[in-house]
Image (cartoon, rainbow, N blue to C red):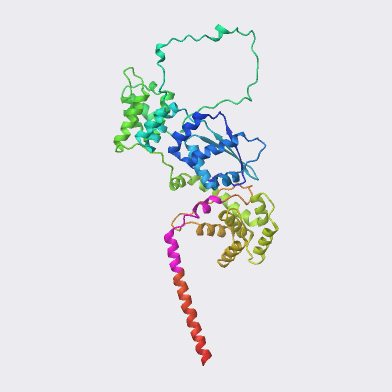
Amino acid sequence: MALQSYDYGLRPHDNFTVIRHFHINHSHLEILNRLYTPMIGSSAIGLYHYLDQFVEFKTDSVLTHYIIMSELKINLLDFRKNMDLLEGIGLVKSFVKHDAQHSSFVYQLIQPPSAKQFFSDPMLSVYLFSEVSKQRYQQLKQHFEDKDQLDMTLFQDVTRQFTDVFKIPNQELQSDTSDIQSEETYEGLNLSRVKFDFETLYDLLQSHFVSTKIIDKEAKALIIQIATLYGLTAESMKRIILKSITSAQELSFEELRKHARTFYLIEHEQQLPKLQVKSESAQSHSSETLTKDKQSESSHWLEQLEETSPIDMLASWSESEPTPQQKYMIEELVEREQLSFGVINILLQFVMLKEDMKLPKTYILEIASNWKKKGIKTAEEAYNYALKVSQPKDEHKPSKPYYKQKQLASREMTPKWLEERDNTNQNDKSMNQTEDDEKLKSDREAFLNQLKTRWKEDTE
């Protein structure tokens, strides 16, 4: 399930740290650029390269997500979408710690697989093949092949051992190595949440007098990969396994992969599976339970907005004291428009998110006047109206963001109205324009009739 920025409570000024438990080299870059880019795109791979620079930063340096937004020219939603791709493909791990003031994130870069690991992986190799042509796939594979490999069977190993060259030490040196960083190797795609019915598979195999001992730990991992890739049931897997058993009653992994691929091609008109990102509706359906748990927290967040001074909200949001001009503007909103703290807080956040964290006074006063005329009096009404005017009418309203109970009122609501602000439905626009034109025409005619009546009275 992909998590959006509000699921993490992610704000621009939340800090982050990047770690990497391996030394990146030219081979890793070749794998990322040539093999992963066709699958998840250049933006996600570019983000991986970009984050790598922060590994060398000193631990006392404070890095915020605003740096990422400013330098990459993206918002937090785009950042999270690319991070979802990197996490899903197994190149990044993310960790978060919340406290009363802000959230801290740790992004761990994972070592890419070797070329042999990549092309031996049944999922990665098939997904790459589906994204590029057959000719291009062969070109990529040949690029990593050792064309000058010697036939070592013609040679005899004459390497001298340690004891042939050096004396054996008389005593052992006790040394603490706990602080020395260890190299982490590629562990493959994370399929720990995938469930396969091995019990049914065992029963089916035993009915054919096949011992379940052939399904060892390594075979289990491969079966889960193949079942996930091709969407196979226990019954289908049984038939594939029966075709993959050798004369020595052992399971051939190569035959298992080949027969599974053939089975899928027959069922799907010779089309291999493609790497597809879950749709927003699928993600929304898979997160229904999480959304229900957030309702009480969202209510508390709206209540907190009602009780928090807009000046305090701005100070918490930007981590700096508001300017005198901003304070005068807030006083004007309170005194002239008589808006509640909650409505003003939503209004200021709404404008900052639309105007790149700027607060143009004229624009704010214009919106405030409009909201007052519409009778918006609470933070919840302001929030719902902001969502309504910032997204197409035919889309479902997004669930309210999750905010920790102790967090300040400035917890970001970026993704929902910022995500949809550029996607307004053109048909709705033209319809609204037509309605406005008809109303304007009607008002004009009524005004002219009124003038004519007054003119007649004056002439009499």
- Asked if residue 311 is positioned above or below residue 25 in the image, the reply reads below
The answer to whether 412 appears left or right of 272 in the picture is right
The answer to which image quadrant residue 138 occupies is: top left
Q: Is residue 193 visible?
A: no
The answer to which image quadrant residue 233 occupies is: top left
Q: Nearer the viewer, residue 244 or 24?
A: 24
Instruction: Please identify the residue farthest to the bottom as the structure is shown.
Output: 460
- Asked if residue 63 is positioned above or below residue 139 in the image, the reply reads below
Q: Does residue 427 belong to the magenta stretch?
A: yes
Q: Nearer the viewer, residue 9 or 269?
A: 269
User: Which is the main secondary structure of the residues drawn in magenta?
Assistant: helix
Q: Nearer the viewer, residue 341 or 277?
A: 277
Residue at (69% x, 56% y) in the render: 323
Indicate the position of residue 184 as horizontal and vertical percent values: 54, 27
- How many marks overall? 0
Indicate the position of residue 420 as horizontal and vertical percent values: 49, 53
Q: Point out the stretch of residues depicted in magenta.
A: 413-435
The answer to which image quadrant residue 366 occupies is: bottom right
